[in-house]
Structures are given as C-alpha cells and as structure tokens.
Amino acid sequence: MAGMIKGALIGGAVGAAAALLLAPKTGRELRQDLKATYNKSMDKTKQWVSEAGTKTQEAAQKVSQQATDLIGQTKSAIQTAKDGIQSAKDDMQESMSNAQKPN
C-alpha cells in the first residue's frame, strides 16, 4: 500500500513537471506555473505531515493508556497474590499454634 502511494506521488510529480516543461509557454508563465505547482505541493506536504503527526500522537496516547491499564492490572494481581500468601501464612501459623497447645 505504501509503495503504491509512493509510486503515485512520484508519477504525479513527474507528470506535472513534464506537462509544465513541454507546454508552449513563455519563460515568465512557466516560472509562475512552476511556483504555483511548488506552493501547492508544499501545502499538500504540510497537510500530510500535520495529519501524520496527529495520528502519531493519537497512537502514542492510546499506547500510553493501554500501558497504564496494564500496569494497574499487574499491580492488582500482585496485591491479590500477596494477600493470598499472607492469608495462607496466617492460617499456617494458626494451625501450628493450635497443634502445639495441649489438648
């Protein structure tokens, strides 16, 4: 997909340059056309860069949120495991205490 877009952009640029250079125009008209085409290309490029930056920021925010959620889940799982271990330890100590008491 990226190769196709790249090919289309390069083909479009080559086609536009050929059209400008092969058209019967005066030097002044040709320079004006070249300048207009250059300005259009720059505007389009700036727009694409801006859109890419926005999409990159959105993706970074999404990844950050997912990482935060995963950290929270991990901390919760660790706390649950600690609580389970502490409970088992307390039960063992209580059982040992009861076993050491004379009947």
Image: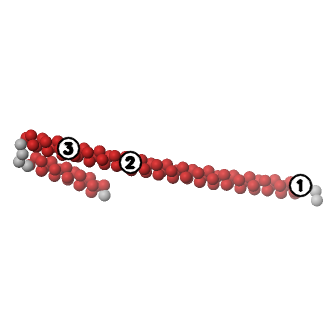
Residue at x 54%, y 49% (from the top left corner) = 68
Please name whichever residue, 10 or 32, is drawn nearer the observer in this view of the structure.
32
Residues under numbered marks 1 and 3 in contact, where contact means CB atoms less than 8 Å apart? no
Precedes in sequence: disc 1 or disc 3:
3
Residue 28 placement (x, y as % from top left):
9, 40
Disc 3 residue crowd, few under 14, some 14–19, many 20+, Cα 10 Å: few
Give the residue at mark 2: 54
Name the residue tied to disc 1: 100
The quadrant of the image that shows the C terminus is bottom right
SS category of the residue bearing label 1: helix
Q: Secondary structure at mark 3?
A: helix
Work out whether mark 2 precedes mark 3 in sequence or the reverse, and give the earlier one. Answer: 3
Residue 60 left/right relative to 21? right
Alpha carbon distance from label 1 to label 2: 69 Å
Q: Earlier in the sequence, mark 1 or mark 2?
A: 2
* Three-letter amino acid code at the position of disc 1: Gln
Q: Is residue 32 left or right of residue 44?
A: left
Q: Which residue is mark 3?
A: 38
- For image coordinates 12% across by 41% down, the residue present is 31
Q: Quadrant of the N terminus?
A: bottom left
Q: Residue 29, position in %: x, y?
A: 9, 43
Give how far across and how far down residue 100 sits, in percent: 89, 55
Q: Is residue 103 above or below residue 43?
A: below
Amino acid type, mark 3: Tyr
Q: What amino acid is at disc 2?
A: Thr
Q: Point out residue 83 in the picture as x, y percentages from the top left corner.
A: 71, 53
